[in-house]
Amino acid sequence: MGNSYAGQLKTTRFEEVLHNSIEASLRSNNLVPRPIFSQLYLEAEQQLSSLEAGSRADNEEEEEEEEEEGSESSSPPVSYQMKPPPEGCCTTDGFCQAGKDLRLVSISNEHIEVPSGFLLVGAKSPNLPDHLLVCAVDKRFLPDDNGHNALLGFSGNCVGCGKKGFCYFTEFSNHINLKLTTQPKKQKHLKYYLVRNAQGALTKGSVICWKGAEFRGRQSSSSTCSSTLFQLPESSGLSGSTSSEPLPAANPSAPAGTQQTAAAIDHIPSTAAFSSAVYNGKESPKQQLVKNNLSALTRPSVLGTLTNSGPPKKRHKGWSPESPSSTETWNLQPNPQAPNRIKNDGGSLSSLPHSALVGPASSPMMGSGEPVAVPDNLLKICKAKPVIFKGHGNFPYLCGNINDVIVSPLLYTCYRNSQSLSRAYEQYGASTIQPISEEMQLLLTVYYLVQLASDQVPLIEDLEQIFMRSWRESHLSEIRQYQQPLPQTFPQVSSQIAPVTSAQLPWLAGLAASSCNDSVHIIECSYSLAEGLSEMFKLLIEGKLIKTNYVVIICASRNRAIDSCIVITGKYQARVLSESMLTPSDYQKEVNYQLVTGKVETLGSFFSTLCPEGDIDLLLEKFYQENQGHISSSLSASVNKPTALNGTGAAACTSYEIERHQIRPFQLAVAQKLLSHICSIADSSTQNLDLGSFEKIDFLICVPPSEVTYQQTLFHLWHSGILLELGLEKEHLTKQRVEQYVMKLDAEAQIKFKVFLQNSMQNPHTLFVLIHDHAHWDLMSAMHSLYPQTELSTGLVDRLLNCREVKEAPNIVTLHVTSFPYALQTQHTHISPYNEIHWPSSYSNGVDLYHENKKYFGLSEFIESTLSGHSIPLLRYDSSFEAMVMALGKRFPRLHSAVIRTFVLIQHYSAAMMAVCGLSQMKNYTSVETLEITQNLINSSRQCPSGHGLMVVLRIPCTPLAAVAYERLYNVRERLALEDNFEIILGNPNSGITIGKHFVEQLKVWQKIEEVDWRPQTYLELEGLPCILIFSGMDPQGESLPRSLRYCDLRLINSSSLVRTTLEQELGLAAYFVSSEIHTEKAVVNDVLESDPEKLSSTDNEDEEIATEGSTSEKRSPMKRERSRSHDSASSSLSSKASITAFCSESSPPLIAAGDTAKSPHRVLSNSAEETTNSYERQKQKVDKGAQTAISKHLPPATEQTDMKQNIKSAQISITSSSSSPFSSSSSSSAPTHNSFVLQTSQCSMTKASKQPPIVFLPKLVYDIITSTDSSGLPKSSSLLPYHSVMWASSFRPLMSKMMTCTEQSLYYRQWTVPKPIHMDYNNRNEGRMDTFHPRRLLLSGPPQIGKTGAYLQFLSILSRMLIRLTEVDVYDEEEININIKEESDQYYHQPGDMWPDLETFKKMPFDYTIHDPKYEDASLICSKLQTINSEDRSMSRRQEDMYTHRQTTRMRLSKYAAYNTYHHCEQCHQYMGFNPRYQLYESTLHAFAFSYSMLGEEIQLHFIIPKSKEHHFVFSQPGRQLESMRLPLVTDKSEDYIKSPTFTPTTGRHEHGLFNLYHAMDGASHLHVLVVKEYEMAIYKKYWPNHIMLVLPSIFNSAGVGAAHFLIKELSYHNLELERNRQEELGIKPQDIWPFIVISDDSCVMWNAVEVDCSGDRKSDYTWTERNVSLKQILQHIEATPNVTHYALIGMRKWSSKTNSGEIKEPFSCCHVHDFIMLNVDLTQNVQYNQNRFTCDDIDFNLRVHSAGLLICRFNRFSVMKKQIAVGGQRSFHIKSKVSDTPVSISPAQYICAPDSKHTFLAAPAQLLLEKYLQYHSHRFFPLSLKNYSHPVLSVDCYLNLGPQIAVCYVSSRPHSLNISSSGLTFSGLLLYLCDSFVVASFLKKFHFLKGATLCVICQDRNSLRQTVVRLELEDEWQFRLRDEFQTANAKEDRPLFFLTGRHI
């Protein structure tokens, strides 16, 4: 059995009590910090639980009888043998022995004769689980409404054959063929009453409330320590079915002996209901059944065996079975701590922290001895039902008027659990540790009760912590050995403490109780608890326990264990405990019942007696008659003022604005976090989300079935513009279209959801985001829906969002959004902890992370405002209201406190309205708080010229009560003629907002709305409307409130349902953004009108000492203020008549005599000065007996009071603002008149309200929980059970820590909470834990009202942009450069429409030396002849690193012919990529391939990695499978599905981002693609591209540039061509027929385009053209089909640009430079090499060499290639850094060269790279004359080096027969000789002319070559050299620097 809560214990002063008086002698004085449990201990708990749990799942049914009988057996149950049926009779299930059908489904419409006094009931047959059998049973043998008083025995008739007079249920069960294997028991098999429905058909009714079942059903499913006494149970409806659910056996192999005291696990009754329907003419029993969990905990044999002392067979009719074997309710998880299964026929409610029960509960343990009679009229005399907590030992039977007591096993459970604690340590050999003794437990319980204040309720959770601490401290040294994480420094604790004996116990308990003024009464008995209980009942009846809240009954004797129980007799405590038993639906039904039956009328008549002038209604009528027709009061006149102003100019107040949709930095940050989580799911190797396959986003937002929340979400969605942005809707958006994207979780939700699912299936390329907003609402399991008859929407979330289609759809992502995620963070959650996104905190280490102009006020800020040092607390309670409620509660014990509280509050509001309207005498009938609220509300609209006012939220969860309140307040408002001053709105979750026409018009004017039919549909649209919003519904469902909210009155919230989610949800209503520029505290302090009136009397302790007032609040509010006369009635809140006559003296509310205050102001002030050192807490709880009498003594009659006020006012006493009440504060209203404030300013009160958070009024009980902290420093509320439908996994868990982040809190709940069976996650369990997480499910949590909706809408926006971004690519979009230098000629060689170049024509075309590729904008110009280049400054427009970041790009949508990187996955190219989920990575083999090359002087060894799937492209030698060659096709081959040219792609640093997936680009055609990679990158490329052929360069090229790759590709290809020619020559093929072309492609070529030219114009020169995206296959096949293609050496295409003009297209072919994507004829270019040393411009260099060799270079202008901007890899992978230090220091290009032999810092970079970079940026140092001197270029021999954009070069080749430009007319400004070979001779150089002063630069491999070159070329003849003109690249000697020498022309 789990444990539950018995109220909220206050441990704040526990240490004080613990370490004083008696405690000091029993325990150590040293307090030791409580360590966190280690993992070791937790594992021990699990093992322990399996030992303790019996294997009982098999015998559920069999053992129930034992529970009913209370018998106990130490052997397993014996199977029941039934008497064989008579021969020849019918034995069919569902039919009686006479063969008549008894099944309900068959005979529901038949007329059945039911004798008088009989009822029709349904019996369950084990063989027909889905059917009920109809029986007629004498109702005397059935239980009454409360589950009791059923006569023993049976009397029934068979409705089938009509046989009557069955006197034994055994006989009857045989007749109706139940075929039982256990002894027939009517309690077990008669399950339901049967009722006739509206159509007259017989249907299943409510469950028959047998005693055992009733209380078994009530046990809470929370294992061990739940969090509070009051927890809302899940069930709130009437269910007709009891589901029988087997328990997963905790330990099937446990020996039978462990079952000694354990009874069977029974079926679990599944509902809780109060039903008022009539069942067969009899009022149905009020059921209290709750679906419960199972936990079979057995008593280990070490505890010994209990003897069977059950009652005799024929029991007293009032006795309820409760032997140790009687089953109580069960928990889902075995409870590791409980040494014994807890007996609980009177278990507690499932979501209650199982406390006491409603109705007479039987004792949780066996009854023994004489029964105790409960006196008649106990409730009438005592005004409350006592709650009896069973403690240790045996508990007697109760009989008689047992409806007037409640028995709870809660304390028993707590005692048992705390005794099991030491067992966890014994697992590890710590056998010496004793559990805490029973005597000590009881004594600590007494201490605890003694220190509880009169308005506090005991909480089992606190008691468990006390036991825990006590035990730990007394066994610290032993524990320390077994628990690692303990702090090292512990004070030594004496482990030898004298134990308390049972003889000492009563004396010590009495001694402890003696100090509490009879609050705790000890009764000692000699023989049994029965005598103590009898005495207690006697004292109660005699009225001797009036001041006693707790009676502790102890029966202690030396020779046996103690028996004990604790009786709660305090009226307040007993009421709270009993009301906390009600489920939400029971609570509503009870209230409704009291309203419908008129029970509340007594309350109304009582109120009318309070008013001396007579009934309030008469007063109102009188006021109405007097003022009708001539409303002359100043107030009423002001009422109309705003209206008049509205007509003339509503803009008089400029502060009005409804905030439209705007994204705050926080929301953007959260949206980005969500996006990064989505990306990480997509990037994980699990392939659960393929983002690359989605083209767009669609979504559906699920909201709770609140009309306002629904409209509010539509409003946000509409104004966010997200639908247009996502392209889901067109410009003209209608409301109907927006509604498609938001779904209310109501009865119609399924239709909308079905459409959503169908869309997701039909659109696999759309990513659907399912957003579950307010996700903590309705987590009911669809299978365990407890109220199918009441709410259709229950379990909908589970049914829809957890359905198989959603879980399996690869294109649906579910996002749960909630402020209270705790219920989704259990051990069985679907959401991975990695998929949780928490709202970020605004500060980190004091740094403001997100600068926002608004400050959020949430729970923590509200709590903080109650601490001393803050100006005015935002959380408050109303002491006078609480006092009146408490007094009335004692007067009307049968009325539910929710009814009393509501009626008192309505009365207060009514009186306050009357007081403000001039009936000043009514001030005595309201509280100061209510008067303040009402005054500010009514006056607010007068302060603003436009009539803006405040909103007051009055929260009334119970809908019927809300309707009563609305009606009453509405009537009072009408009578007072205030109907135009403020509106009263009834906010019901299921309906929209209704407000008066007058106010609608006002709102339309303020919001500038023209629409005629407009009505506000969300609370946000009520901005500025003065109103009381009565907010009903059991839970808020995500409704947001406007900024004009000023007061949040939560005094009526259900304070008995203390669950963390529920509490925080209610307080979340007040969460608020205020402008952060305003200093909030000051704003509040200076707010004269709205600050809280000073209340010296607002303490809730009746005995509070007046002198302690102001102790710490003096710090809080140092400004002394004059007390306002209009609030003087604060001193009494109720009139003296109300306080003296209405209540007996014990119930006097805490009043302070105004006379006292007037007489001794100095005493008050001096004392408060003395006591400022008192802690706030102590001040709040200080108890002073006797103040009460002083109060009554000094209360003057009502008439005198007014005079007294006058005196006080005239005395002008200035009293320090103070109060022991945590929310009291001061205010001064200047010059008050009798009925209104005179305002100091006319500032719009709405504006002021929006600059400060609202003030929240709470019930005192809730206030105490929220503002007190537990030992971890967290608010008490955070340690409550997080949610109704979860339970704690263990009662002894570590406390949450104050330092926990949201993530750590989540992990805490994931470890320590488990869902109950009614929770939708209950069945989500796998052995492999990871499998339970759904991969596409995320959880976003953040405080209420902080902007989560805006964040997830923004997330949709950026997710959509990212998807589009994934289908888009940034491509370079730059115009060709140097167009103006192009030789313009009128001659066009080809027609625009020509498909291929004509070879002869093409040979005539001149070569265009000029570079036009925009990537070479920073490269030197190449001069072709005497050009008139304008000497405009072609200075470097970009720095080196800007080259890549600032080039112009444009975003293009990827076409279906694009090349992709590794992130692209689609089904078509899975095989191409080699990622096959069924296999490991594709197998591939490594092949060496060697060839010799004379220029390198050595053999080149290359390696091929060839996947098995690509081996057909190669030729292998037969015996050894040596790689021989790569197959080449023939020139004559023609095939549509084949690309002849092998494609080589050199790449570095781009294993992820390189565009190597050419499957789509090639349109599926077969092609050979080889990646050329460096040796050190081989493994990573192979990992990412397992199905690609790799050519691995030798290791010597690891630091080489792209030139080396191009060089090797070309040389290898030529070598392969030779091999193929030889191989195929043997097959008879001519060498020239082998295909000689290869393609060399950059790794960033993404798409290819073709221009289609239409020449159908009249004239030949007319044409039109269009450009479209085509496949690479189409382009390559077109080029390969070029006539005479083998005569071209290089074929290329244009670089794509959006600005391409028709001039470029007019000539379809150009003879010019080609780049990026080229087809290379390796045969023709055999003798032209790439320079293997080059890093940059190697393609320009190669193009010039090819042209000078007389070969043709053709560019197809009809085709263009798009290049993607890739930010990583490529040239950028070369970083130039110092060789000495590893620290990355930026090195400027000027440092790349140095003088030889100098001490310059050497650089770790190839010499060639340093040279090229230096010349690019600093060549003007070598060629000063050449700078911007474009008509005198630098002569560059046999090579092209980039000298920077400001210097022009002229390229000449020294090879014989080469084509060179005519240089006859050119004079050069410099000469560049780079590694010149033997073709360069002195005579060649002498042909050229140089300017005087021109400079020379000779570059060689070493200094020796340098000198030899100077001599060989006779350079000293014309050039002058100096020693200092020699340089080298900044390389160390081992890195082979390049040397250069400069000289001047003579």
Image (cartoon, rainbow, N blue to C red):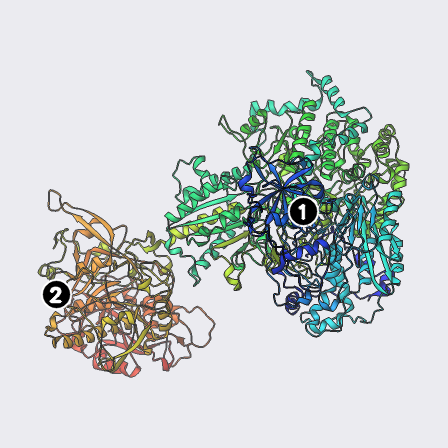
> Which quarter of the rendered picture does the N terminus lie within?
bottom right
Residue 949: quadrant of the picture: top right
- Between disc 2 and disc 1, the foreground one is 2
| Left or right: 1191 as drawn, with respect to 491 | right
Which residue bears the numbered disc 1?
862
Badge 1: few (under 14), some or many (20 or more) residues near its Cα, within 10 Å? many
Viewer-closest of 1780 and 1496 = 1496
Dot 2 falls on a residue whose secondary structure is: loop
Viewer-closest of 1398 and 1300 = 1300
Query: Residue flagged by tag 1: what amino acid is it?
Result: Phe
> In this picture, is 557 found above or below 1900?
above
> In this picture, is 1665 found above or below 1856?
above
| Left or right: 1651 as drawn, with respect to 1033 | left
Residue reaching furthest left?
1400
Q: Which of the numbered marks, if any, corresponds to residue 1532? A: 2
Viewer-closest of 1773 and 1590 = 1590
Image x and y of residue 249, in percent: 60, 62
Viewer-closest of 766 and 648 = 766
Residue 1542 visible in the snapshot: yes
